C-alpha cells in the first residue's frame, strides 16, 4: 500500500513539472456555446501542435502540454479563425468568440469536393472516367486548379494532362468548354454560396490530434510512413533525399540523408528484423536503413549485373516468409522483384503482357504499370 502511494505521488510531481493545461469555451456571436470547433495549441519551438474539439457546452481542455508559450487557434468551416497568441500561463482560461465567414473569405474555405461537385456530368460513367484520369493527382475546382485563364490555356493544359489518352473521346471533345464554363472567374462568381457542413458532434469531438512538422518548410515531400519496432515513426522525404524519423514521445526529429546523389526515396517498409527498406525510384536502387547503426546499404534493384532497374515503387515483406524477402513493384518495366535482405540477391518476375491483362491495355498506363503490391 505504501508503495502504491509513493508511486502515485511521484507521478503527480512529474505531471506538475512537465505538463500544462489550457482550457476554456467557444461561443458564437450571440454568446451561445458552440460544439465541434477545433481548438489547436501551436508550439512553434517544437514545430508541433495539439488539437481538441469543443464539447456540447462549448468547453474544451488541452492537457499534457509542454511548459512553453502557445498560439491557440479556434477553427470551424463557415467561421473565421480566432486566435489567442502567446499563451504562457498554466491553466489559462481562454474564451473564443466565433464570427461567420462571408463573401470572399467564405468562398476561400470551399473544399475540393464542393468545387468538383460544381462540374456537371451527363452520367456517372463519364464522371468516373474523369476521376480516374485526373482526380487522383488534382482537386478540380480548387483555387490552384483554376489557374488557366483563357480557353486556349485550358486547352493546352488538358491536351498535355491527358497525354495518356485515358479520357473518353466524347469527353476530350467537350471537356475544355465544360471546365471553362464551370471554373472561369466569371463562372465562379455565379456559384451558389458555399454552405459549410454541420459541425462535428458525438464521438468525433472526443478526438485529440497531435501533429508534427517534418522536413524543411515548403520543401518537404514526405512519402509513406511506417512505425518502427523501436517505437519511432519512419518516413521518406523525397525533398531531402532522406529518411526522417519522429519520436512521438519526445517530439524529437532526426534526418538521415541518403549518400551522394539524388536517389528519389519513394516508399519505406520494415523487414523481419525491423530494419527499414526503401525503394529509390529515381536511381533504380534499393536501400536498407539499419535502425540501430543508422547506416545505409544501397544496391541495384535489378538482377546482377544490371546496376539499376527502372522505377522501384512499392514494397512489402511477408511476415510468414522465413527467408524474409522484400518484394517490390517496378512501375517502369511491368515486373515485380524480390531481394534477399542478407545476400542482396535480386530476382525479377515478369508480369502479364498488356494483351493478357484484365484491362487489356486500356486506362492510364495501358494497363501495365505495376504500382501497389500486397
Ligand atoms: C500524374 C499526376 C497528374 C494527372 C494524372 C493529371 N495532372 Fe494536371 N497537373 C499535374 C501537375 C504536377 C501540374 C502542375 C505542373 C504542370 O503544369 O505540369 C498540373 C497542372 C494542371 C492544371 C493547371 C492548374 C494547376 O493545378 O497547376 C490543370 C487545369 C490540370 N492539370 C488539369 C488536369 C486534367 C483535366 C487532368 C486529367 C485529364 C489532369 N490534370 C491529370 C499533375 C497531374
Image: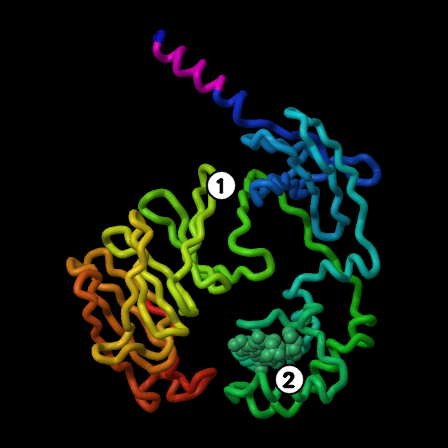
Q: CA distance from mark 2 to mark 1?
A: 42 Å
Badge 2 is on which residue? 157
The crowd level at tag 1 (other Cα within 10 Å; few <14, some 14-19, many 20+) is some
Given contact means CB atoms under 8 Å apart, are the residues at marks 2 and 1 in contact? no
Residue 185 in picture, x, y percent from top left:
80, 75
Mark found first going from the N terminus, 2 or 1: 2
Residue 251 has which mark?
1
Residue that appears at 51% across and 62% down: 221
Residue that appears at 57% across and 92% down: 169
SS at badge 1: loop
Residue 365 has which mark?
none
The crowd level at tag 2 (other Cα within 10 Å; few <14, some 14-19, many 20+) is few
Give whichever of 17, 160 is nearer the camera: 17
SS at badge 2: helix
User: For the magenta stretch, what is the residue range?
Assistant: 3-13
The answer to which image quadrant residue 351 occupies is bottom left
The overriding secondary structure of the stretch rendered in magenta is: helix
Residue 282 in picture, x, y percent from top left:
41, 74
- Quadrant that contains the C terminus: bottom left
User: In the image, 220: left or right of 295?
Assistant: right
Amino acid at each position: 500500500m505504501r508503495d502504491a502511494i509513493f508511486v502515485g505521488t511521484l507521478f503527480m510531481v512529474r505531471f506538475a513539472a512537465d505538463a500544462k493545461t489550457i482550457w476554456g469555451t467557444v461561443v458564437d456571436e450571440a454568446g451561445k456555446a458552440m460544439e465541434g470547433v477545433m481548438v489547436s495549441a501551436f508550439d512553434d519551438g517544437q514545430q508541433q501542435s495539439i488539437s481538441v474539439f469543443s464539447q456540447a457546452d462549448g468547453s474544451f481542455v488541452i492537457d499534457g502540454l509542454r511548459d512553453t508559450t502557445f498560439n491557440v487557434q479556434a477553427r470551424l468551416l463557415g467561421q473565421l479563425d480566432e486566435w489567442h497568441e502567446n499563451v504562457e500561463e498554466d491553466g489559462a482560461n481562454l474564451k473564443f468568440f466565433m464570427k461567420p465567414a462571408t463573401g470572399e473569405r467564405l468562398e476561400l474555405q470551399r473544399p475540393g469536393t464542393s468545387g468538383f461537385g460544381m462540374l456537371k456530368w451527363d452520367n456517372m460513367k463519364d464522371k468516373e472516367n474523369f476521376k480516374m484520369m485526373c482526380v487522383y493527382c488534382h482537386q478540380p475546382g480548387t483555387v490552384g486548379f483554376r489557374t488557366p485563364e483563357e480557353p486556349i490555356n485550358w486547352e493546352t493544359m488538358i491536351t498535355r494532362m491527358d497525354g495518356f489518352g485515358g479520357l473518353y473521346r466524347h469527353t476530350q471533345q467537350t471537356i475544355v468548354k465544360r471546365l471553362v464554363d464551370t471554373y472561369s472567374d466569371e463562372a465562379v462568381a455565379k456559384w451558389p454560396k458555399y454552405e459549410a457542413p454541420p459541425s462535428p458532434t458525438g464521438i468525433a469531438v472526443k478526438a485529440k490530434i497531435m501533429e508534427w512538422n517534418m522536413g524543411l518548410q515548403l520543401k518537404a515531400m514526405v512519402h509513406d510512413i511506417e512505425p518502427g519496432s523501436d517505437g519511432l515513426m519512419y518516413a521518406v522525404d523525397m525533398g531531402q533525399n532522406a529518411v526522417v524519423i519522429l519520436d512521438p514521445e519526445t517530439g524529437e526529429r532526426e534526418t538521415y540523408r541518403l549518400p551522394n546523389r539524388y536517389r528519389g526515396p519513394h516508399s519505406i517498409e520494415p523487414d523481419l528484423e525491423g530494419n527499414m527498406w526503401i525503394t529509390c525510384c529515381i536511381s533504380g536502387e534499393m536501400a536498407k536503413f539499419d535502425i540501430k547503426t543508422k547506416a545505409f546499404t544501397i544496391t541495384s534493384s535489378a538482377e546482377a549485373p544490371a546496376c539499376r532497374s527502372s522505377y522501384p515503387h512499392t514494397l512489402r515483406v511477408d511476415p510468414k516468409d522465413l527467408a524474409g524477402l522484400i518484394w517490390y513493384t517496378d512501375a517502369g518495366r511491368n515486373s515485380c522483384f524480390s531481394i534477399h535482405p542478407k545476400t542482396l540477391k535480386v530476382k525479377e518476375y515478369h508480369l502479364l503482357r498488356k494483351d493478357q491483362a484484365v484491362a487489356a491495355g486500356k486506362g492510364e498506363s495501358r494497363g501495365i504499370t505495376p504500382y501497389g503490391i500486397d
